[in-house]
Amino acid sequence: MIFNGLLGFAMMLTVLFCIGDLQTVLETKTGYPFIQIFYDSVGSVAGATAMAAVVLALTWACAIGITTTASRMTWSFARDRGTPFSRYLSKVEHRTKVPVVAVGAVTVFSALLTLIYVGSATAFNDVISLTITGFYGSYFLPAVFLLYHRIKGHVASKNDVPSSTMADETNGAVLGSKEGEGEKSASPGDLNAGTPIVEVAQAALAWGPFRIPGILGIINNAYACLYMIFVIFWSVWPPETPVDATTMNYSVVVTGGVIIFSIVWYWIRGRKEYEGPLIDDEVKAVMRMGSIVAM
Amino acid sequence: MRHKIAIAARVPSTTLCSHPLFVTGISIIGRNIMDEIAAERNSERNADSDVLALLGKKQVLKRRFGLISIFGFAMCELITWETVLAIFSQGLNNGGPAGLVYGYLIAWLSTLSVYTVISELASMAPIAGGQYYWVYMLAPVRYKKFSSYIIGWLTSLAWIATVATESIFAGLIIQGLIILDYPDYEPKQWQGTLLAWLVIALAVFINVVIPGLLPKFETFILVFHCAGFIAIMAVLWVYSPHGSASSVFATSLNEGGWPTQGLSYCVGFLGNVATFVGADASVHMAEESTCMSISPLLLPST
């Protein structure tokens, strides 16, 4: 953020100082004002092409990395049975250890999203604001909860970590037993015979190696939350007025649609399938062993 | 008697990745089993997979990314100067040069604040799932399941939309270059979408067929990212006529036709926000880098 921010700011000042005539740049045929600026600057098609090709290569490389990230996110959610067809989506290819089905799924959906561009002149703007609405929406909730817990002092400090991680069956955070066994909180004594063991990951609230301590952290966290509300609000506005069907900002439709769909899907299937982040069998085996010893 | 599962804390954390979860973590007894599991999987057990085990997950993906390559990865997902070039016109139309410059500074510092919080969370629980895991960890008991479910969907959507954004960006740059090089070409919007699909196709190919090359690729792109910046800056400053300071710092525009300049600033501000979006990429790669505890620092630093 700091390093890239500096580069970006330098580039922005450069572009603004070198922009030349505003109107020709904004009304460029190429669709990208920066290509026009490059052309006006070097005065040759070949030179401008070479410069824009550098930007293209880096953007393309970014698209490749973003695809990786997006697939890992969806894969991870499928692994916890959050998505439909989660069994397939969470598959990891044996040779490469890559979740190939998830890669396929996210790219098919993003290919569909690019179809917005066929119909809407401001689609470029739409997909941008769609990412903002989605991201800031997804950051907002954990940030608000963290703010609450840090004000209340619920988060153990790094030096003050409890000596053991307790997963207490009665604290409500731990959801029942294995699917099919149907014993919600069966007799806790017998550990060896498939007794309920923590199904859902519930790490103790403790700071990691990195945090802003004390009141500064609270101020920062509070500011971040306020800023996110501001951004989410403005992210659904169209780029110009008056608005018609082609200049409409469709991000609110897509984001709202996904939120509504996920709520509906939660009531239909999700609440039966999704239990929160699950604990893998191998890890459970370790925990089971650990608990026997602790007993 | 209450049924408790206790994991004793006796693991020495001499490794680079000394994580508090790890310190609280898997006991010596558990360790042997972890070793067995590792042997079964033919993979090495290490501090990173132990942290992951504490979050409830076994190591499935391959930890391909070292410190440099994950740094490159984080840098290249942000690609701020390239995005500034690609979308500065949004802020230019609404707000003008002055709106862009001051908006950029505000967006930069504020986003830094947001990502500091995100990296605090990533530091608490470094896991590929990210947001929905944290929501589950932090939400009130009654709403844990529901809220983390919704956030899981929202985060997936955001990332899918980012794939769409980047590929549209790249696709339209290709189209822009064709327009520049062939003046007779009549651009159509659907061709832009097709070019975006071409971009996606290559991304799928690299991700599925040769993922082993990704770390080297990201390291290369990191160098290219810096070199390209210097080259383009140099060309622009040398060849272009320079505007005056007032044309940059004191010129506002309202091309969107908003009733007030203030509204126009706010609408254009979103272009600046978009410049920094997606910096949590390295968070979702937490299960693929060899040092989880460093990863959260990537967000504010890169």
Image (cartoon, coloured by chain):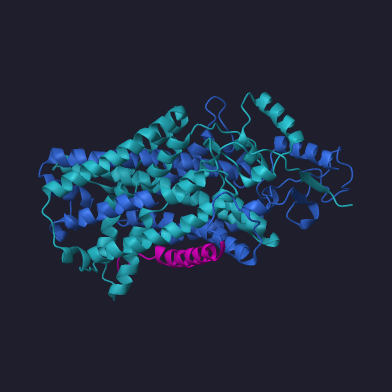
Chain colours: A blue, B cyan
Q: Locate residue A180: give its quadrant.
A: top right
Please tell me which residue lies in front, A202 or A124: A202
Residue A282 is situated, as x and y percent measured from the top left of the image, at 71, 34
Please tell me which residue lies in front, A48 or A146: A146
User: Residue at position x 70%, y 61% from top?
Assistant: B142
Q: Main secondary structure of the magenta part?
A: helix
Quick check: is A233 in the magenta stretch? Answer: yes
* Span highlighted in magenta in the image: A214-243
User: Residue at position x 20%, y 57% from top?
Assistant: A16
User: Residue at position x 32%, y 60% from top?
Assistant: B104
Residue A44 is situated, as x and y percent measured from the top left of the image, at 10, 41
Residue A238 is situated, as x and y percent measured from the top left of the image, at 35, 64
- Vertical side of A57 occupied by B209: above or below: above
- Vertical side of A167 occupied by A226: above or below: below
Please tell me which residue lies in front, A152 or B225: A152
User: Residue at position x 12%, y 44% from top?
Assistant: A42
Q: Is residue A282 left or right of residue A212?
A: right
- Vertical side of A150 occupied by A94: above or below: above
Q: Is residue A7 left or right of residue B181?
A: right
Number of residue marks: 0
Q: Locate residue A58: give its quadrant.
A: top left
Q: Is residue B73 left or right of residue B7?
A: left
* Residue most extreme to the bottom: B259
Query: Can residue A174 be seen from the camera position used here?
Result: yes
Quick check: is A198 in the magenta stretch? Answer: no
